[in-house]
Image (spheres, coloured by chain):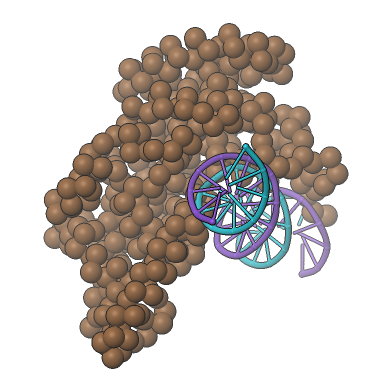
Chain colours: A brown, B cyan, C purple
Amino acid sequence: MGRPPCCDKIGVKKGPWTPEEDIILVSYIQQNGPGNWRSVPTNTGLLRCSKSCRLRWTNYLRPGIKRGNFTEQEEKMIIHLQALLGNRWAAIASYLPQRTDNDIKNYWNTHLKKKLDKLHEDSDQETHHRHGTSKGCHSSPSSETTMYKGQWERRLQTDIHMAKQALCDALSLDNKSINLPVSSSATTSEKSQSVLPPSTQCTSTYASSAENIARLLPDWMKCSKKSPQTSSESIETTHTRSSLINQQFPSPPSEAYDNSVQFGYSNNLIHNHQKDNYYSNYSNSDVSQSVSPETSRFQDESKPNVENEMAPLSFLEKWLFDEASTQGDLMNMSLEESDDFF
DNA sequence: AATATCCTCAACCGCCGTGTC
DNA sequence: TGACACGGCGGTTGAGGATAT
């Protein structure tokens, strides 16, 4: 005898999630925590399969998710990590705590793959022009096979270093988030872009809902004394909109629903579904603030908690971290220095 | 202005390892 | 021990928006 079936396929809703469904799901997880997905549809009344609920939470509603444009450094990290780990998006995402594997996968497939293909084509042309001498540019199985041993070793070393760099970024507790300037040798345009707050770099109207949801969760606010301005700002904004929500959802299904309305993340959900510019109002806060201890609590489920606890480090992460601490000179090597390989 | 084409990304599908009974 | 469900992951799809013609 196995477990009872997850969900019968009949009567299971598919397609895009509605704001109401999001509110119900977030309210439930807020009360019960993530996990035990099988019970979620049953206990919430959502006509979704448990898998869909988990995905919705993991990829969209979970606190601390950063959406929108990828920074140049994030881009480089993805490229390096992809070269190192392959299409193991979950593993790559663990080095970018604010990004979901789905996001990274999408970004790779829609942007980076094309970009690298083009670069590869260009380098191939140049290689042919030079009668087949390997230039040692970006990694690919075909190019690697033609590399001289020394070049390959150097590349591998650099890849390992990049992974270390990525891990250190992820482990960093201060404000040196992944959005900070890559190095002192960055170009003027890079610098000017990097020093801007993440929100100002984002030109898309598509903004994060999750980080705001996180900020607005009652538990998050209760313990989030480090950023009173942000919290009060959220409260103020949400209070002004709570009446609207109460009008839109006059019959909350539970006390949790009341809480969610009270603290306003339902507003975010609704506005996010409308894909308007609402989130730009919140976007002045540092991204790092959104990854609060309470946020990490929710992130624990699918992401290593690198900010508060060292416990969940994998063997590889431990190794990288140890190596990093003993090889400070290597760690000082900037991402820019490895651009030759790309 | 209308239509065609391209692009993005949320969500689904199916597989696999693990846990439960 | 085997059968089966769960949870997680990577690949893929398709609706809708953006851009080109």
Residue sitting nearer the eye, A114 or A175 = A114
User: Could you tell me if residue A96 is visible in this image?
Assistant: yes
Asked where in the image residue A231 lies, by quadrant, the reply is top left
Q: What residue is rendered at 68% in x and 16% in y?
A: A249
Residue sitting nearer the eye, A56 or A3 = A56
Q: Is residue A274 left or right of residue A186?
A: right
Residue sitting nearer the eye, A321 or B21 = A321
Q: Is residue A33 left or right of residue A230?
A: right
Percent coordinates x, y for residue A108 in the rendering: 46, 58
Q: Quadrant of the N terminus of chain A?
A: bottom right
Percent coordinates x, y for residue A289 in the rendering: 35, 31
Residue reaching furthest to the bottom: A131
* As drawn, B6 above or below A196: below
Q: What residue is rendered at 28% in x and 91% in y?
A: A131
Q: How many marks?
A: 0
Percent coordinates x, y for residue A175 in the rendering: 25, 37
Q: Quadrant of the C terminus of chain A?
A: bottom left
Residue reaching furthest to the right: A10
* As drawn, A65 above or below A236: below
Percent coordinates x, y for residue A322 in the rendering: 26, 58
Q: What residue is rendered at 79% in x and 44% in y?
A: A7
Q: What residue is rendered at 43% in x and 52% in y?
A: A94
* As drawn, A340 above or below A299: below
User: Could you tell me if residue A152 is visible in this image?
Assistant: no
